[in-house]
Amino acid sequence: MAQAVASLEQQADKTALITGSEAIAVACKLADVDVITAYPIRPYDTVMQYVAKLVANGELDCEYIVAESEHSQFEIVKHASAVGARVFCGSSGVGWMYAFEALTVTPGLRIPMVAMVGNRALDDPGAFGVEHNDALAVRDLGWQLVWVDNPQEALDTALIAYRVAEDRRVFLPCAISCDGAFLTHSQALVKIPSQEKVDAFLPPYNRGDLLLHPDNPITVAPQVNEDWLMEIRRQTAAAMERAYTVIREAYAEFEQIFGRRYGNPFFEEYQTEDAEIVLVGMGTLSTPVKVAIREMRKEGKKVGFVRVRWFRPFAAEELAKTLGRFSAVGIIDRDFSLGSPYLSGVLATEVRAAMYPAAKRPPMLDFICGLGGREVTLPDVKKMSDIVYHAAEGKPQPLTQWIGLRE
Amino acid sequence: MATFVDIQPTQQLDPIKGVKKMPLEEFFTSGHRTCQGCESALVMKLMAKAAGPRTVVLGSTGCMYVANTTYYSTSWVVPWMHTQLGSSGSAAMGAASGLKALMRKGKIKDEPINVIAFCGDGGGADMGLSAISAALTHPDYNLLILMYDNESYANTDIQLSGSTPYGAHTTFSPPGKMKRIMHHRWKKNMAGMLAAGHPTCKYIATVCMSYPLQAMNSVRKALSIGGPTFIHSLDPCPKGWDYDPMQSHEMGELAVTTGVWPLYEVEEGVIRLYGKTKEIAEGRYKRFPVRDYLLRQGRFAHFTDDDIDYFQSKVDQMWDKWLVPGVIPFLKEVETDHPPK
Ligand SMILES: Cc1ncc(C[n+]2csc(CCOP(=O)(O)OP(=O)(O)O)c2C)c(N)n1
Ligand code: SF4
Ligand SMILES: [Mg+2]
């Protein structure tokens, strides 16, 4: 085995200039997905345009179904997965919300669906640009949620998502969040691995004793009421707990086979070793944040960045330990949670909850920023860093501030 | 001529020649908790019997979910899965496409497996209409959607649906001091609408379990013919219609003999009325007055003679004026008034 893996590692990857959406379509092909359903909504739908091309050209052998609504889109793949098919689906903004009922029932059925969310602001009023509220809406339901920030990571994470979701210890759906436009439509050079590597990494989907088939005549999702609902909910919760381990294993083996290293799967740390303060965020705002950090460091400001990848399961203890190292923390929310504690965003609320039991709790500020696809600019990042520095120096700051807002 | 339709063979289920020739095996058995005299439960039982063991059944929320699949006492012998209220069309598509992909790609044994999704009238004709319609336009999947129509949202305590008959008393349409008739919409013409609107769908039929042999053979034809198919069953419901449970069978017969519920099948575009409906259309059987049907049911107890006359006039129109009696509600006069030159 070790030898086989070593020889795989030497296989040259192909390199292609592709968008985040196309990278995920390529992952679908490499994962030999069986059933894919599409419905148009920007910006995620580019992935389905690429999928359609792959199918039309005979490069991907799957049932490719254009559904008549997102609700049907997700219900179709849910049932296809129940009979043992590997499935892919996705949506954006209000499309994702239109599918909400289907999204709700999928984890409880232990369906390892992989979906792409092209993060988009929710109507009304209309906006195509990125906000994270669409994907975050399912955060309590048993979906695994992961944010990526470049096309290579999108491709790799899609393969990892199948491996984790379809692990019998987990059997929970996974949504890969890609910021609208900044990732769905932005190209980068991507290493496309060989089929052999993917096959070595990703075993076939085996639904086992949960398979819906005449050879295994089970009744799925009977009426349980108060007699059993709690026990079944607990089983789903336990599966999410096991996902921590399975995610770690998957990244470790990914590194072995593909030779690409992601470090801690749950969050990425950027220039944190000597940082005095850090910013925390998800998705493609990592680009302006990292550029601004490089500039600020030239001015002697030791700012670091923590990019949360896996929002569910949330690596609370680890993150709390990491953030405890700094003298103040600024969380950037590309989302909102109206009326929430301290009128913050979702990420800040979660991070604060994660920090509460920690031994060291630095001041934590929240910034609502970049909503509706508004650019997070270098001056924005510098402004936020300055505010966090003030907090570090013990000057009281508002707990939540909207940044880049026209007053 | 390439059609690009890629369809797998179906099970060839022969018509059952008579009641004595019915298969003995049951695939929907004890364990369910429906009301006494529930015709919908009989639909489930005979549908499963007609389909046989190599079948996957998907069931929308409703009485046939809640009352049939109590944990640890499921009545389903064949594999069964719950599907969301409006998802029968998508459920059938999902299971059929999944099986098809796995068989084509050699991941499971290649064999014809029946896929049946059922839904109630609320789940089907109201909420699920869009998904059912979509499923019927996909020629590549072998599937049957069966809508059991007990003419209300029964499981949630009998509320009116788009399939509830005019004037019926439901918990959302109680007769009151100001308004005797709270529900004044005419029942949706579900099967006719689907047949007219989905010209590539090979089989759409109406059935009533008071005529079990025809209904079972309809299920068999729908599963054998290939592609997506639809069956609409009218199911007397003692709780919702308010009559003595022992009269269920008779109530179904009355629905047909009064002309309220026409029995027909549309097979590859050809319409065929059958049973008593055919005799009515051919003038060999005189329709009973709807009064005989309505006044047997508590849900119409508040009807005045006027209400009954109105109901009768609408049913008469169905038979005397519709382009295809009982099926297509365009008025023939259009043609006779303006004959094509
Ligand atoms: C999305 C959604 N809305 C509402 C309900 C509540 N509900 C459960 S069963 C049911 C009745 C369904 O009526 P019908 O499809 O006619 O089936 P029946 O109960 O009459 O057998 C309703 C409304 C639900 N389960 N899901
Ligand atoms: S309410 Fe009607 S459909 Fe529901 S179980 Fe009772 S008789 Fe059957
Ligand atoms: Mg009903």
Image (spheres, rainbow, N blue to C red):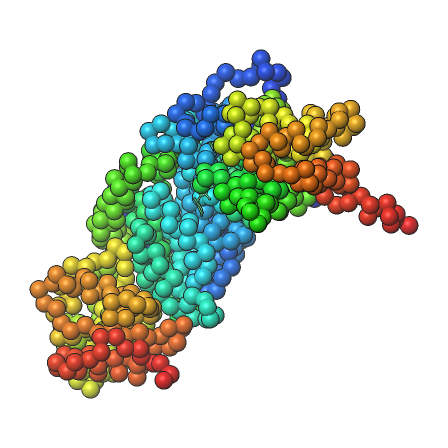
How many numbered discs sit on the rendered protein? Answer: 0
Residue drawn where x is 68% and y is 44% of the image: B196
Quarter of the figure with residue A14 = bottom left
- Residue B168, position as x, y percentages in the image: 58, 40
Q: Position of residue A395 (x, y in %)?
A: 15, 82
For residue B252, above or below residue A125? above
Position of A298 with respect to B124 (left or right) is left
Residue drawn at (62%, 38%), measured in percent from left and top? B303
Instruction: In the displayed orientation, state which residue is furthest to the front.
Output: B177
Q: Nearer the viewer, residue A309 or B119?
A: B119
Q: Where is residue A323 drawn, in percent x and y?
A: 16, 68
Left or right: B243 as drawn, with respect to A313: right
- At horizontal 54% and vertical 28% (from top left) the residue drawn is B243
Which residue sits furthest top?
Answer: B20
Q: Residue furthest left?
A: A359
Q: Nearer the viewer, residue B247 or A233?
A: B247
Considering every residue shown, the one lying at the far bottom of the view is A299
**Residue B294 position (above or below residue A236):** above
Which residue corresponds to the image point at 75% horizontal and 45% vertical from the top-left? B330
The reply, left or right, for residue A327 in relation to residue A238 is left
The percent position of residue A288, horizontal first and vertical second, equals 31, 77
Say which quarter of the image contains residue A379: bottom left
Tell me, yes or no, if residue A223 can be seen here. yes
Q: Quadrant of the C terminus of chain A?
A: bottom left
Which of these two is toward me, A105 or A256?
A105
Question: In this rendering, does residue B104 appear at all?
Answer: no
Q: In the rendered view of the protein, which quadrant contains the N terminus of chain A?
A: top left
